[in-house]
Amino acid sequence: MNAATYVYPWDVVGDASAAESIAGLGVDHAVVAAFYHATRVFTPRHPVHRVVVAERTASYLPVGDAWEQVLPAAQTWVESEDAFGATAAALAAAGVPTHAWVVVDHVDRFEAPHVVNAYGDTYPWALCPSHEAALEYAVGLAAVVAARSDIAGVEFEAAGWYGFDHLHEHDKVAGIPLSEDELYLMSLCFCDACREEYQASGIDVGRLRELVCTRLDARFAASSPLPGGLPDADLAAAVLATRTRVANRLRGAMVREVRTQRAHDFPILFHANPDPHRSTAFTGVDVATLPKDTGVVVNCWNGKTDNVAHTVGHDAPVAAGLLGIRGMGADSEGLAAQAIAMRAAGASGIRLYHGGLGSTADLDAMRGAVTAFHEGAS
């Protein structure tokens, strides 16, 4: 049983008290961003700043000559050439081991092959895992992380299909709310590499594209989301099987790279959703097909145990991701009870979002959740 919280390097670098504050939560380790997408965040306790703007996908640790042409450029908004290393060192001094938080196929301002929807629109925030270049990119992320002696484990986010559902600056797409089926269809990729993958699976790409556009156009003409996805069940199954194969190829390559440098007890977890159609940061995964000796973190931000219950039983450890930020919708008063419920449902760990973003009151609630989880595990 283990409990951890997420941390950004800018939460710790330049704040001499931050590591002790995180240690005070009682967590077994911290999961620190090593490769991360663009974001704008509060830093409510930092002595120097209150807002940090990460302008693009960036690396927070040196990647070395072998990977500098493949991986994102170094960040420039934290005053450290190795912001991840500085964070890990501060946490280690406070008695907290560091795991790496690595965002894979969710990118911003990064030149690489991206998802192209059925209408031909490119999603510059989503890498397409069908491409060899995206595979090389993912393996590079794994290689850099595995080589670090200050990393005791890794969590891969968006390691598979990432799609339309993306929190974007000045977003203007909420006017037409989409169902889960419609989000999936908006996330299907039709780039050249995906067209080849479909064809290799015996899928008529032209017919698939026509069916997707027809179904989505019906939604755009309607006043509310429509039930159902692709009308051809056999075609829908073939498409999902193709996407599962592609995503598993990516995850398998990353795990093999890590295992060339780290032993089998080095934790490797994937942020996952037990619904294989999902194309979000917690990407859809068939847990039964995950690489050996890996685990998952499932999103339980709503406080419900469903995702844990649907994921346990596949020889993969399951950690429940819990939301600890009131302003983002957390039930802080019920957080400890949620932690206990996740353990009862079969979770071997909890992940608290987020040790840097939270107010002092939020941190108090997270501390209580960690205590409740640990006490129930003893």
Image (spheres, helix red, strand yellow):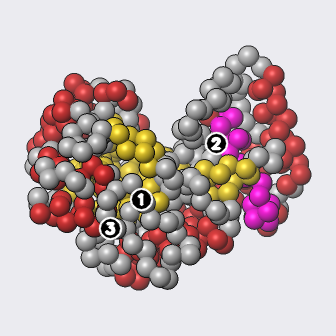
Give the spatial CA distance, label 1 vs label 3. 11 Å
Q: Kindly identify the residue that appears in the image at 23 percent across and 33 percent down.
A: 359
What residue is pinned by disc 3? 82
Dot placed on the residue nearer the N-terminal end, 1 or 3: 1
Q: Residue at x 25, y 71 (%)?
A: 150
Name the element at disc 3: loop
Of tags 1 and 3, which is closer to the observer? 1
Q: Circle 3: is it few (<14), some (14-19), or many (20+) Cα within 10 Å? A: some
Q: Earlier in the sequence, mark 2 or mark 3?
A: 3
Q: Nearer the viewer, mark 2 or mark 3?
A: 3
Q: Is residue 309 above or below residue 58?
A: above
| In this view, 148 is above or below 303 | below
Res. 169 image quadrant:
top right
Q: Which residue is mark 2?
A: 164
Nearest-to-viewer mark from 2 and 1: 1
Task: State yes or no: residue 183 in magenta.
Answer: yes
Find residue 195 and report its horizontal and vertical position in percent: 80, 60
Query: With 43 as the anchor, is 250 left or right in this view?
Result: right
Mark 1: amino acid: Thr
191 left or right, relative to 59: right
Q: Amino acid at mark 2?
A: Phe
Image coords of residue 28 (percent x, y): 18, 55
* Mark 1 nearby-residue class (10 Å; few <14, some 14–19, many ≥20): some
Q: Which residue is mark 1?
A: 76
Q: Amino acid at mark 3?
A: Asp
Residue at 81% x, 22% y is 221
State the SS at label 1: loop
Marked residue nearer the N-terminal end (2 or 1): 1
Q: Report x, y in % for residue 263.
A: 31, 79
Q: Which residues are magenta?
A: 181-196
